[in-house]
Image: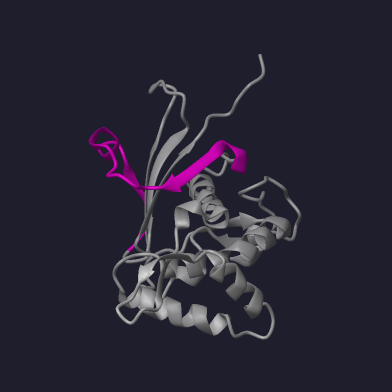
Amino acid sequence: MAKAHRHLPCGYCGRVTNANQHEHVVPKSLYTSSTDRTFERVTVSACPDCNREFHKDEAHFKAILTAAGEHPTMERIELWADVTKSFKREKGGKGDFIAFDEQLEEVGKWPDGTPMHRVYPGRNDRVLKVVRKIMRGLTHHRDESQIIADERVIAAIIVKPVPSDVETVLEEVYRVPNVANCRACFFTAERSTNLHSVWAIKLLEVEFCGVILPVTTSP
């Protein structure tokens, strides 16, 4: 599989380096021991530069998403054990912990008086960057001729239910139970719009929305 990706254009920037690697579109660190192995783990070709860039943010992404949410699911419990173990790594662990700790916001007190903290994925640039990466990667996996620049993608946290008229047009693009549910509507020339696609993405317990803008052309 890795050799097959080597000579393909990078799904994120379009470069062909003859050293491209397969990149998991949904970070592989989100899959747990309970993830059904029959589900495809979507990958695309990625150049070494893009691969390194995403790798820097995905550990932080995992920590924030695992800490977010109201319900301690089995998946979150397992992933959080991995996260806390990674904070103790000799190489990079302290920096990862500091980056995570900086995202904690005090929201109250527990009954014993200790501070209660919460993380807000929608305010975290590194988290939203990975969400945009997922949208870009799934778009390229769907149609390899499409390489979406990050500047064309907008992602945000969902704070209100998705409007019913949008819900009706969203179709499943990629789904792994309890890990990821990615839905989108891709617009065509026949469906006149000023958007390339609209998205609703649920990762663990956190829900995001997003749009991909069309290619702009100079007059």
State which region is magenta.
150-176
Q: Which residue is drawn at 29% across and 42% down?
A: 162
Q: Residue at x 51, y 40 (%)?
A: 154
Q: Would you place residue 49 above or below residue 142 in this image?
A: below
Count numbered badges in the picture.
0
Q: Residue 64's x, y, as percent? A: 48, 66
Q: Would you place residue 184 above or below residue 214 in this image?
A: below
Task: Please identify the residue farthest to the front as the structure is shown.
Answer: 113
Indicate yes or no whether the magenta region holds residue 128.
Answer: no
Q: Residue at x 49, y 48 (%)?
A: 135
Q: Residue 79's x, y, as percent? A: 43, 76
Q: Position of 49 compared to 160: left or right?
A: right
Q: Position of 33 compared to 70: left or right?
A: right
Whether residue 33 is visible: no
Of 2 and 65, nearer the camera is 65
Give the image quarter of residue 109: bottom left
Image color mode: one colour
Q: Residue 180's x, y, as percent? A: 38, 60
Q: Position of 149 compared to 37: left or right?
A: right
Task: Please identify the residue farthest to the right as the structure is shown.
Answer: 17
Task: Please identify the residue farthest to the top as the structure is shown.
Answer: 219
Q: Residue 68's x, y, as percent? A: 40, 65
Whether residue 79 is visible: yes
Which quadrant is home to the C terminus?
A: top right
Which quadrant is home to the N terminus?
A: bottom right
Of 158 and 13, nearer the camera is 158
Q: Which residue is drawn at 59% across and 85% down?
A: 88
Q: Would you place residue 208 above or below residue 70 in this image?
A: above
Give the image quarter of residue 20: bottom right
